[in-house]
Image (cartoon, grey):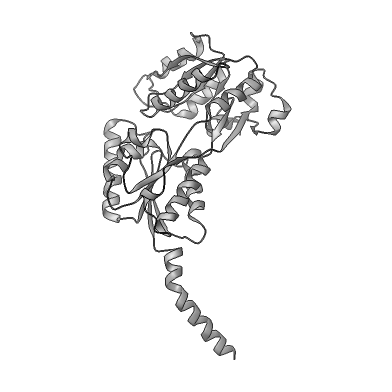
Amino acid sequence: MLKRLALAALLVLALLEPGLAAQTGGFRILHIMSFNSPYRWTDGQLDGFRAGLGASLKPEIRIFQLDTKRQSSDEEKTLNAERARQLIDNWKPDLVYTSDDDAIELVVRHYANSNIPFVFSGVNRSAEDHGIEGAKNITGVLEREHIVESIHLLQTLKPGAKRIQVLSDNARYWPQVIGRIRSLAREHREFEIVGVDQPVAYADFQQQVLKNPNRADAYLILGNFNFKDDKGKDVPYPQLQRWLAENSQVPDISFWDDRMLHGTLAGVTVSAYEQGLEAGKLARAILVDKRSPASLPIRATTKGEPVISLARARALGIRPPSTQLLSSTVITTYIWNR
């Protein structure tokens, strides 16, 4: 009897095995990061992507880091992009997942309307601006900032803060973000943009922060990577963030939780995990459900989480309302003091 049951079980498994193989393995996915790992934003997207694929899907995932924030010259970007494209051509993945704008510009657009499906996340610029709108093989998740929500959070911490100065590096995807900020400022009278500055030199950034020539009530910090020191080298963003926290008495906000870990006062943050999660669901629909990328609309995620650096608030003499602390993620210490 036991032998017959065992044989029956083996027969069932044999019948199911082809279907299981199609559902749970055999796929090759290449993940091309615009930036590098470890980095909270990049790694959070990949974690979400794996979750979005589902536990039953166990593909082979290879990772390629374009590392454009640390290897930011045109020559370095071109070389790394060529290596990424060569890997695609040689390895022939079933799907390519990319994170952030640089991967779109340097890699994805070269494969528009090819037979390889691409899924992206963390992208600030529009598909039209990237030259991939309507491509039959590309879909993904746009990153949209919680601009008004972040300024309202600032105003609960610093009542009366209205005059906002935007400070950023000069990465190519920030003009669209700045355009969205300006557009919302025209619609919302509770705040105004008093200046937008994108210096190249780190020394110029420092001077702008310390002098505050536009008499801003708060700084909105966008890009914090591509500022050059006096030798033309990129200043590491943790160094910039620490200098800002230790030298500026002007409250600052941003849209990514990594910033609050590194001393920014507050922000309603874009969820890296949710960006990746939605991208993973799109990838699963393509690989398992055999949906075409063109049938899966490009969309933006909506989840925002308020995050407050209590360490920065104390340094600025700000006492956040207890109700706001209870509804926010609170960072109690600077990352360099841990």
Q: Residue at x 46, y 36 (%)?
A: 143
Left or right of 292 on screen, residue 280: right
Q: Is residue 239 above or below residue 103?
A: above
* Quadrant the C terminus occupies: top right
Q: Residue at x 39, y 60 (%)?
A: 27
Q: Residue at x 56, y 16 (%)?
A: 189
**Residue 298, picture quadrant:** top left
Q: Residue furthest right?
A: 322
Q: Nearer the viewer, residue 323 or 222?
A: 323
Q: Residue at x 49, y 29 (%)?
A: 238
Q: Position of residue 87 (x, y in %)?
A: 29, 50
Q: Position of residue 320 (x, y in %)?
A: 69, 24
**Residue 134, picture quadrant:** top left
Q: Is residue 212 above or below residue 43?
A: above
Q: Nearer the viewer, residue 25 or 72?
A: 25
Residue 186: tell me if it is visible.
Answer: yes
Q: Position of residue 6 (x, y in %)?
A: 55, 85
Q: Is residue 136 above or below residue 260?
A: below
Residue 264: tell me if it is visible.
Answer: no
Q: Position of residue 245 (x, y in %)?
A: 56, 22
Left or right of 189 on screen, residue 69: left
Q: Is residue 121 above or below residue 316?
A: below
How many marks the image carries: the answer is 0
* Quadrant the N terminus occupies: bottom right
